[in-house]
Amino acid sequence: MDDKEPYDRNVRKIEKEIVDYLIQSPLYSTRNEITSRILLYIIFRKEISQNILKNLTGYSSGKISEELNNLVDSGMIIRKKIPGIRKKVYTFESVDQISTTRVKNIITALLKWEGELDKMKNEMETNRSKLEKMNGYSNILKVIDFYLPAIKLYEKFADSLKIK
């Protein structure tokens, strides 16, 4: 694979429209936009170089490199060296692998918030008389009361997936 764009301009235009559409969907909206764009282009193309990703997304080489390293470190994608030349491409084992890894990463991130949310709720309840008159108090408490039980469910799910 070289860094020459293998797709014609019309195909790239349609590909970009699909990527732009999917970025707005709930499936990809939980990640930052650059990570989602990179993942989608990797999925669409199966194998892609950093330089082509840079050309497709318009992001800097440094930002692309940083995101690719994060995705490789998380296990979502694979860095593959091309034998005989000093070139790397990025690919994936399966869309299932990407999806499973994303779910595990989201659950791990949510589980880290349990202690903080417990502390926040306790402080809010302890200082209720002072805080409840403040704008947003009840909304923040509702959010905390929504997420704490949800985190308990995520803990059970994490145990079943052996995430912790």
Image: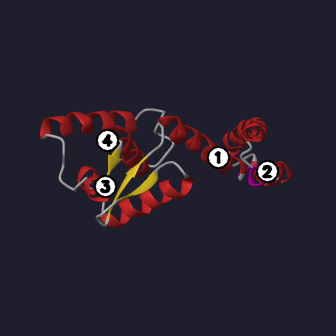
Say what secondary structure mark 4 lies in.
helix
Of callouts 1 and 4, which one flags the residue occurring earlier in the amino acid sequence? 4
Left or right of 54? Residue 150 is right
Instruction: Tell me if label 1 and label 4 are in contact, CB under 8 Å.
Output: no
At numbered mark 3, what does the secondary structure look like: helix, strand or loop? loop
In this view of the protein, which residue sits in the foreground, 144 or 71? 71
Question: CA separation, marks 1 and 2?
Answer: 13 Å
Real-space Cα separation, disc 1 to disc 4, in angstroms: 49 Å
Going from N to C along the chain, the mark reached first, 2 or 4, is: 4
| x and y percentages locating residue 14 in the rendered image | 22, 33
Do labels 3 and 1 touch, CB within 8 Å?
A: no
Q: Residue at x 20, y 39 (%)?
A: 12
Q: Is residue 126 left or right of residue 41?
A: right
Does 102 sit left or right of 3 as displayed?
right
Type of amino acid under label 2: Met
Span highlighted in magenta in the image: 113-118
Q: List the single residue furthest toward the left.
A: 9
For marks 2 and 3, give the CA distance. 50 Å
Q: Give the quarter of the image for residue 66.
A: bottom left
**Label 3, label 1: how far apart the Cα atoms are:** 50 Å
User: Which residue bears the numbered disc 3?
Assistant: 49
The residue nearer to you, when weighing 106 against 164, is 164
Mark 4, residue position = 45
Residue shown at the point (34%, 38%) measured from the top left: 44
Colour scheme used in the picture? secondary structure
Residue shown at 18% from the left, 41% from the top: 7
Q: Which residue is mark 2?
A: 124
Q: Nearer the viewer, mark 2 or mark 3?
A: 3
- How far from the left and from the top, in percent, is residue 76? 51, 48
Q: Main secondary structure of the magenta part?
A: helix
Q: Estimate the spatial distance between the alpha carbons at disc 4 and disc 3, rounded to whole Å.
A: 10 Å
Specify which label sits upstream in the sequence, 1 or 2: 2
